[in-house]
Amino acid sequence: MARPKKQEIFQLKAFKNSSGTTSWRIFGTKPNGTRVRKNFADKVDALEELADLEKELQGAVTNTPRPQRTLLTPEEISDAEVAIRAAGGRGLAKLINHYLTLETRARAKGVTLDSALSFVESHYRDETKAVTILNAYNEFVATRSDGPQTTKAYYESTLKLLLKPDPNKWVHAFTVADIERVLTSYKNPNSKRTIRGAMATFFRWAVRHHHCMENPCDRLDKLQRDMSQIAALSLDECKRLLYASILMENKATVACVAIGLFAGLRPSEINDLKPEDILKDKIRVSGGKLRRKLKRSTPIPPVLAEWLKEFPFTGLPAGWASKLKRLKKAANANKWVPDIIRHTSITFQTERDKNEALTAYNNGTSKQMMDRHYRDIIDDEKTVSEFWNLTPAKLRAKPPQVDLEIKRRVNWPDKKVLAKLVWAKPLIHAAADIGVSDVALRKHCVRLGIELPPRGHWIKR
């Protein structure tokens, strides 16, 4: 009996390509109607595919992967398997290409990839901490609380210019344009230099604390030189200033004005000056701008010795700021700038000594700072000589005309007497007895904690 003929569903046939090569094609239709048509360049691959289709047709399932032809040796195949597992699902070729690119870049810099990574690990810094300018401002000002209050006030007033546009702006978002926008509103180069210095200090602090990556002030254009005329008091204005201090109540401001005018101390240095710092022939300057324990010694010229002999220095008087405003008004100067008393002193010292280096040394400054802020030219030697001989006696011999606002001192009764007085008569009458206004009397009582009659008390009486 003959063997039944095998029914072929899929067929394998060879055909010629236009290039002259031979390819192998499998074609047929699955029982579910799906057509199969596949081409293979190698007959072995075509036979393997045909066997798989027939197994699928018979319902056989196998998990064994089809053997693949390769040019790799068994050792290379094993190595490739380990590398693929280590790649964690990433393409092995992509990883190798990336590594070779990094190696090439490192070699171009003259280093190995390992040494480049070691450098990055030792110099890497955490990313910037996102903080608003308001929070950074409060944090920075808190770090300046241990220093002089004038310095803290300087940073507070200057850095508030950064808060005005947007207090919630990130510190790392500030650019050179933001700083320039603030500076353009000021015309005076010295004002710009002062504001720029405060902002540069703030951003240097911010860089150290990782609030920003760079200091935008470092890339600002160089500020132009201040070519405006340097302000200094004339001889007549110095006379009015000194004579007004003599006329002021208690003569408490005379020593401070004389020290600033004839010794050239800074206002902050006079503020920190103590009576024991005034020696026979020099003044020991400590504290002040640089806050050192002992910064320098300033010689006492003969004219200053005469003033200190008659008006000894006992410390900065109470209410010095308001008193200085009255003296400024009495001096009637054509131009008054901050530190003008020190400007005037260094100007006259320069003309007297004819030695800029010596003058700069005695005043704790430099020749460059003298040219920028202090120096002025006085051509008349007679004026210079008269300034350095302006003793209290010579000033009184020919006193200048001074318009000084004299404040009358009020002799307030003690607390017990004042408490009885405000309950004995209405405030307007009690104030007239003392010689003040009823408003001033009310403020004084509130300051002392004295209870006042309620509103309508005297009407009911």
Image: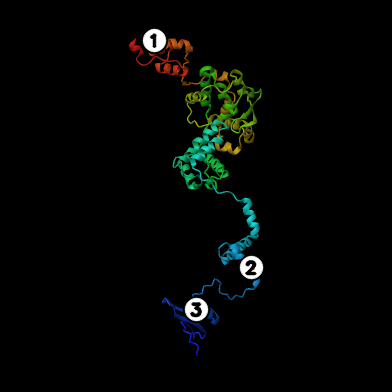
Residue underneath mark 2: 79
- Which x, y percent locates residue 143? 56, 36
Q: Residue at x 38, y 15 (%)?
A: 454
Gap in Å between the C-alphas at discs 1 and 3?
Answer: 126 Å
User: What amino acid is labelled 1 in the image?
Assistant: Lys
Gap in Å between the C-alphas at discs 1 and 2?
Answer: 110 Å
Element under disc 1:
loop
Front residue of this view, candidates 388 and 411? 411
Residue underneath mark 3: 54
User: What amino acid is labelled 3 in the image?
Assistant: Glu
Q: Quadrant of the C terminus?
A: top left
For label 3, the crowd category at 10 Å Cα-Cα, with few meaning under 14, some 14 to 19 and many 20 or more, is some
- From this viewpoint, which residue is outermost toward the front? 1
Front residue of this view, candidates 425 and 407? 425
Q: Nearer the viewer, mark 3 or mark 2?
A: 3
Residue underneath mark 1: 425
